[in-house]
Image (spheres, helix red, strand yellow):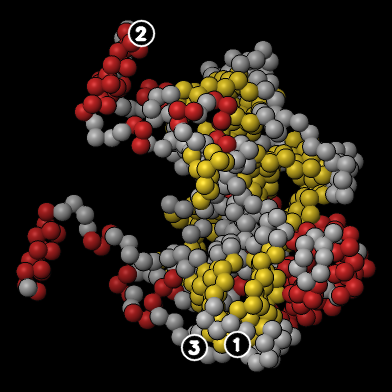
Amino acid sequence: MKMMIINIFFILSLVSSISFASVQDFCVADPSGPQGPSGFSCKNPDQVTANDFAFSGLAKAGNTSNMIKAAVTTAFAPAFSGVNGLGISVVRLDLAAGGVVPLHIHRGASEVLIVIEGTIRGGFISSDNKVYLKTLQKGEVIVFPQGLLHFALNNGTGPALAFAALGSSNPGVQLVPSALFASDLPSELVEATTFLSREEIRRLKRKMKMIIRIFFMILSLVSSISSASVQDFCIADPSGPQSPSGYSCKKPDQVTADDFAFSGLAKAGNTSNMIKAAVATGFAPAFAGVNGLGVSVARLDLAEGGVVPIHIHSGASEVLIVIEGTIRAGIISSANKVYLKTLQKGEVIVFPQGLLHFALNGGTGPAMAFAAFGSSNPGVQLVPNALFASDLPAELVEATNFLSHEEVKRLKGMIIHIFFILSLVSSTSFASVQDFCVADPKGPQSPSGYSCKNPDQVTENDFAFSGLAKAGNTSNLIKAAVTPAFAPAFAGTNGLGVSMARLDLAGGGVIPLHTHPGASEVLVVIQGTICAGFISSANKVYLKTLQRGDSMVFPQGLLHFQLNSGKGPALAFVAFGSSSPGLQILPFALFANDLPSELVEATTFLSDEEVKKLKGVLGGTD
């Protein structure tokens, strides 16, 4: 039998066009090679052994003789090299009596935790500030959704042990207390974005800097992970090799706030050309900070009569918002149905990934729009260029497209008949090709989005949205308003991996520290001046003052904020790499719900007086 199998594979190797060596079963981490958005470089398969797929670092209890009476031992890439790129990793959690893992976020993965010994009180806070709190005994399990604030506390009388699995080989971690009080985020910005008083912040910064230093020193002793290996972002390094997921990562020590900002969209493009249009792109590597984050942006300028010809983005869906003028835009589905819409200032349209679409200035003056994509490098193929500016022989263009100058009008009448014949001889049903899934809020919702509306009931209006045309009401505590264009309100974005929002800020207005569990974000300033920033998992602050036309990107799941630092009102539009990115505002998550005060105190190091005071301001209860 053995000889038979050997002979079969020998024959296959002669007759097959595929090499078995080219099938990538795994990518064991090689920390000496370049790191990309999807993980570490692959070790040479010839050097891979069984040891690469095993890890003994979780066998020994961690040292809980520290301030939080807890130890976390991680099995992430590259320490556990075999998990690299496989979308999973594991952690050991040791808690002495009274031990706590403070409020934190895993921006890159959901987590499932199982109690092995003792009693653990675990909980998380949803985007609508609802608290889900559970006391777990031996053998019980809890799941923490990606990007949401959560914690674990030993509320028993003896030690507790748990193991947690995460849906990423490098999920990242951001501890809230250290992000706020052990980073170099200026005290006035902490105050503005969390509602804490300046005196409290200064006291906590003095107290926490020493505490967090000790905490991280302890973590570095008991944990198998280096902070440097937690990948919050991957700034494009065009000098390094490029992979399907993006460019190589710039060395983190060389990354600055400028890498996350881009001024290339501030200036109008030159429309003195044949198509009377100009497109300026904020893609990687030019906009280095978007590399691997699943989001990017472009500016579209159209003179009167200008057009962006029929084209395709193979790598992403697109959402477009009109800033000035009138734009007539359309989509052609795989079933050859046309969705055509005339858009005015503030109106939005979405173009599903891979479908033919176009934009045309339908007004009497110039038009301008911004477009966002659910990829840092979505690709573009202009149909006229592909057909007539390439070296595809003329006879092949004619044969594959039924085209000649004289025949175009005659063939318009024939094409319907040709496609009818194709539908009879083809094994593919056009109805089974899902170009889009317009949200039907009446149907059941799944992890990937809302149910799909019946395609026969879909119209142009499902792909357009006028809700961003009007300024939001900033007469409130934070002097700001956010108007979202998410599914299901903007039904056409459902499942397309892209959405948008409008941000209005009165003088002194602020969007407090918050996270988006489900997507990275790119912001474009339309009016005024905005001070924006985010805090990395290593507690480094990336802070930038943005003027009109400037852009900034915020990596998925990281704490970030926006503040009007100018004298007048400010306006920005933001785009997300998800049709429903989620939102969790930190002050509301901590102080505007029924999370017990003692748990807020235990997991944030805030005093009882501070917690109760802020709960009173924001409406929380014990």
Q: Secondary structure at mark 2?
A: helix
Residue 264 placement (x, y as % from top left): 66, 39
Q: What is the number of the mark on residue 59?
A: 3
Position of the C terminus by quadrant:
bottom right
Secondary-structure class at tag 1: loop
Most distant residue in the front direction: 442
Location of residue 571 in the rendering, given as x and y in whole percent from the top left corner: 78, 38
Amino acid carrying label 1: it is: Gly
Mark 3, Cα crowd under 10 Å, few <14 / some 14-19 / many 20+, is few
State the CA–CA distance, disc 3 to disc 2: 75 Å
| CB-based contact (under 8 Å), mark 3 and mark 1 | no
Distance in Å between CA atoms under marks 2 and 1: 78 Å
| Residue at image coords 79%, 37% | 472
Relative side of 4 to 81, left or right: left
Q: Position of residue 201 (x, y in %)?
A: 87, 68
- Residue type at mark 2: give it: Lys
| Side of 195 where 297 appears, left or right | left
